[in-house]
Image (cartoon, rainbow, N blue to C red):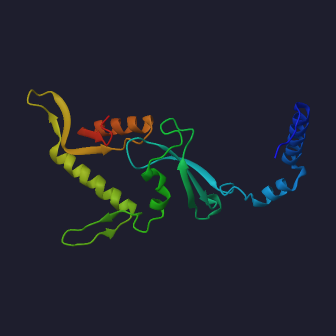
Amino acid sequence: MNIDLSRRGFLKLAGAGVAATSLGALGFGDAEAAEKAHVRAFKLASTTETRNTCTYCSVACGILIYSKGDVAAGEQATIVHIEGDADHPTNRGTLCPKGAALKDIVHSESRLTTPRIRRPGTDRFDEISWDEALDKIARALKDDRDANIVLKNDAGVPVNRWTSTGFLAASATTNETAWLTYKTVRAMGIAGLDNQARV
């Protein structure tokens, strides 16, 4: 089938097509109404956004946590979505597979949410309060420091070295937190300080 179409006829036909498409795109057609009927409300519009750092490795990727429930009104906040923070300079919105699965880990039934202790002579872990756990840690540190601190070396020079305890810090922290951790550990005299990034 041959269509005899002049240049002028082609331009008229193309112009009419552009005009019809433009009118439809501006909302003068049924297509616009049909499209609006299929668009649902943004699912995160009614949530609270919280910026945080991924807990997995030493990269310290930024994440956005979305939760429902007003904590100020006494409601329990529930995490409904976690994604990479596009404004974070480390990951710029991307996450590794473990970071992308953070929401599943937060809601996992096997996730520990309270401290536990395995008492001598038993084969199970008992839950204890955070106050009791921190008191036990502080007592163990104090007893070990009192028993093992080296105040002076063989030449009589004050060294205040505590070599029987080490400290493993988190590398996924801010500079201010890292500085405070370093100063606290060194003030106690701990010589062995490291973190998982080994920086």
Q: Nearer the viewer, residue 189 or 66?
A: 66
Residue extending furthest left? 154
Q: Nearer the viewer, residue 17 or 169?
A: 17
Relative placement, left or right, of 154 versus 44 is: left
Percent across and percent down for residue 49 are 61, 50
Q: Nearer the viewer, residue 176 or 106?
A: 106
Residue drawn at (19%, 31%) of the image: 159
Please identify the quadrant where the C terminus is shown.
top left
Percent across and percent down for residue 86 are 56, 41
Percent across and percent down for residue 181 are 36, 39
Q: Quadrant of residue 118?
A: bottom left
* Above or below: residue 29 compared with residue 62: below
Relative placement, left or right, of 93 versus 190 is: right
Residue drawn at (78%, 56%) of the image: 35
Residue extending furthest front? 1
Percent across and percent down for residue 73 are 65, 61
Relative placement, left or right, of 160 versus 92 is: left
Q: Quadrant of residue 48?
A: bottom right
Residue drawn at (88%, 53%) of the image: 29
* Above or below: residue 119 compared with residue 19: below
Relative placement, left or right, of 164 versus 52 is: left
Count of marks, rendered view: 0
